[in-house]
Amino acid sequence: TKLNVAVIPARSGSKGLPGKNKRLLVGKPLILHTVDSAISSGVFDLIIVSTNDPEIKLLLDDAKYEKIVVDQRPEKISSDKTEMFDVLTYLIEKYSLHSDTLLTLLQPTSPLRNENDISEAFNLFDETKYKALISIVETENTVLKNCLISNNVLEGIRSSDLLFKNRQSLPKTYKPNGAIYIYKVKDLIVNNGFHLDLVLPYLMTQQKSLDIDNLNDFERIESILN
């Protein structure tokens, strides 16, 4: 049978804010905000928390989290250089996830994304039409003028047309906000990573898109929740 699986990655060893996944946000460890939203969304058959931190396992040993599988992540995929794709392929193999399985990645650093966002995104995602769903937030549209430098030459200028336009006449731009990613297992494997064709955008507000990287972010989100 086809499974809907949520993966919540919770590596220890954050450089920006050490121990952030366990840090209390309005009296509840940060990771539990995402775990509780995933459970309350009602869309998952299985929720896997991937961690290399034994203390996170203890947080989830509570009886009310009996539907959660805590996967002890091997050290080789626990560094800050580990790609998320490596973590997902490890879990796909370990749990023999069928190619039709829908994998939803929920990062704990987006605690303002709630169960309604998860279930709405999930219900909007039509597998017959799209290969993936990514939650996004509107950005400053001047990013259309951004470029790279390679061998001391400007690269990646989209067009002189965009480069010299004023902000008001540029189209709107968006970026992934890190809150929700939905993929089919088979597409992840076939593409050997995250593909960008036929991706359904799920637009979220600036506030819900706030992401925790450092202490300032944490305190800002705490004041919103309070």
Image (cartoon, grey):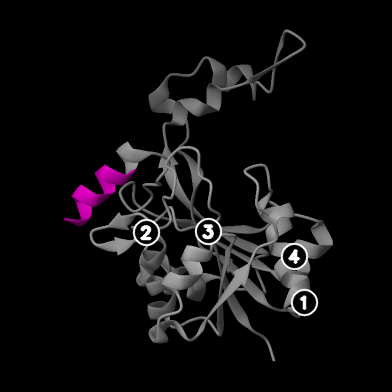
Q: Are marks 2 and 3 in contact (CB under 8 Å)?
A: no
Mark carried by residue 90 = 4
Q: Nearer the viewer, residue 79 or 145?
A: 79
The first of marks 2 and 1 along the sequence is 2
User: In the image, what residue occupies the spot 64% across and 25% down?
Assistant: 158
User: Are discs 4 and 1 less than 8 Å apart at CB?
Assistant: no
Q: Evaluate whether residue 194 shows in this view.
A: no
Label 4 or label 1, whichever comes before in sequence order: 4
- In the image, which disc is placed on residue 10? 3
Residues at marks 4 and 1, CA–CA distance in whole angstroms? 14 Å
Q: Amino acid at mark 3?
A: Ala
- Residue that sits furthest to the bottom in the current view: 1
Q: Specify the segment rendered in magenta.
A: 218-226
Q: Amino acid at mark 2?
A: Leu
Amino acid, disc 1: Ser
Q: Is residue 221 magenta?
A: yes
Q: Nearer the viewer, residue 201 or 67?
A: 67
Q: Quadrant of residue 64?
A: bottom left
At which x and y percent is residue 194?
71, 54
Label 4 neighbour load within 10 Å: few <14, some 14-19, many 20+? some
Mark 1, residues whose alpha carbon is within 10 Å: few (<14), some, or many (≥20)? some
Left or right, 55 with reference to 151: left
Instruction: Mark 4 vs mark 1: give the one in front.
Output: 4
Question: Residue at left 70%, top 69%?
Answer: 91
* Residue 190: quadrant of the picture: bottom right
Left or right relative to 191: residue 172: left
Q: Alpha-carbon distance for marks 2 and 4?
A: 24 Å
Q: Position of residue 54 (x, y in %)?
A: 53, 65
